[in-house]
């Protein structure tokens, strides 16, 4: 069931509704909710969230990207988005629009100084995430992609409580130290009843720009082995590409550049894998036709 903003009781009398009811009203206008998680920092989780959101928007899907990495927000920088978010006459936060299909909200875009340190405890973090969901003008979306900080702390726990239907995309790199932490993320999702759509292996090697030889920087194959061991779907491997770093620094994701590359191909296959998994889930939930 979708929310009709003109007739929905929650929207029509927002001053009389609880925060939770207003959030549910907003979420009813969003078809799919994905939370991008990792067990540890440094695995390229925000890059994965950025490129997944962009790849989906390039296919024509309406996408919102919500950066809840409150202590280390990087999404605006990667998209080249600057300035404070505007507030509408209805007192709604207006997300940045990277393109007509992609809206972005981050705590960095609500601070006067981008380098300000966020020193908050759990309740304050939960309140800000509530505000991102309740007060942002997301409109109708096909996807809301949530970029959470590494680990299993307050922020992913807040999403599990506020968006219980969210599905987790877990990011790892192939080496054992990352895989050990990612197994904790998998167990976290199972404990809080967050459905796991699958695991993606990032920075899964580099093709030498001179000879073309594949170099497994952080070992190889660990992501697939972990997904098999933990019995969750494997969504693919994304190689390391120095141009991704350059694109993030200049605020222009390389998915926007002309030409093909192993990285672009892998990102698109990753996005296709998620779309396929979601389609299978929807098909499985369809009621049987009674003749």
Image (spheres, grey):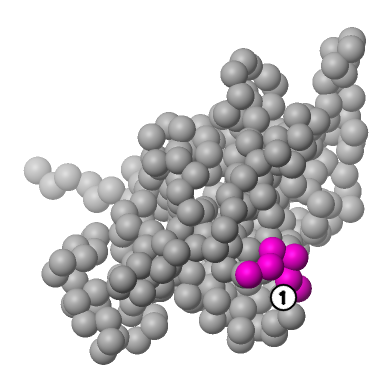
- Whether residue 274 appears in this view of the structure is no
Q: Is residue 158 left or right of residue 7?
A: right
Give the residue at x 80% y 57%.
Answer: 41
Q: Which residue is mark 1?
A: 118
Which residue, as the protein is rendered here, is positioned at the far left?
Answer: 291
The residue range painted magenta reads 112-117
**Viewer-closest of 226 and 43:** 43
Residue 33, image x and y in percent?
A: 46, 56
**Viewer-closest of 223 and 88:** 88
Give the residue at x 81% y 52%.
Answer: 42
Q: Is residue 266 left or right of residue 180?
A: left
Q: Residues within 10 Å of mark 1 (few under 14, many from 20)?
A: few
**Viewer-closest of 261 and 224:** 261
Indicate whether residue 37 is drawn in magenta.
no
Tell me the SS state at disc 1. loop
Q: Quadrant of residue 89?
A: bottom left
Residue 53, image x and y in percent?
A: 53, 44
**Viewer-closest of 221 and 113:** 113
Q: Quadrant of residue 156?
A: bottom right
- Whether residue 118 appears in this view of the structure is yes
In this rendering, the count of numbered labels is 1
Asked if residue 267 is positioned above or below residue 213 in the image, the reply reads below
């Amino acid at each position: 069931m979708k929310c009709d903003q003109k007739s929905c009781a929650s929207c029509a009398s927002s001053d009389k509704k609880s925060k939770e009811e207003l959030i549910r009203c907003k979420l009813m206008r969003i078809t799919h909710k994905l939370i991008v998680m990792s067990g540890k920092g440094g695995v390229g989780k925000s890059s994965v969230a950025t490129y997944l959101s962009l790849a989906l928007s390039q296919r024509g899907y309406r996408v919102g990207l919500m950066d809840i990495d409150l202590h280390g927000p990087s999404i605006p920088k990667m998209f080249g988005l600057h300035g404070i978010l505007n507030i509408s006459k209805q007192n709604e936060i207006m997300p940045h629009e990277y393109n007509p299909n992609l809206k972005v909200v981050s705590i960095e875009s609500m601070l006067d100084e981008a380098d300000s340190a966020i020193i908050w405890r759990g309740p304050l973090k939960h309140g800000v995430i509530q505000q991102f969901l309740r007060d942002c003008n997301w409109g109708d979306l096909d996807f809301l992609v949530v970029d959470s900080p590494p680990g299993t702390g307050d922020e992913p726990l807040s999403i599990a409580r506020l968006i219980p239907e969210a599905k987790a995309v877990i990011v790892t790199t192939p080496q054992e130290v990352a895989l050990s932490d990612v197994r904790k993320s998998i167990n976290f999702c199972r404990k809080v009843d967050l459905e796991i759509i699958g695991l993606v292996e990032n920075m899964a090697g580099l093709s030498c720009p001179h000879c073309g030889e594949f170099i497994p920087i952080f070992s190889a194959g660990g992501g697939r082995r972990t997904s098999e061991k933990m019995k969750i779907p494997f969504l693919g491997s994304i190689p390391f590409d120095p141009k991704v770093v350059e694109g993030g620094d200049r605020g222009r994701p390389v998915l926007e550049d002309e030409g093909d590359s192993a990285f672009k191909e892998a990102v698109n296959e990753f996005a296709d894998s998620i779309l396929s998994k979601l389609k299978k889930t929807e098909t499985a939930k369809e009621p049987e036709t009674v003749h």
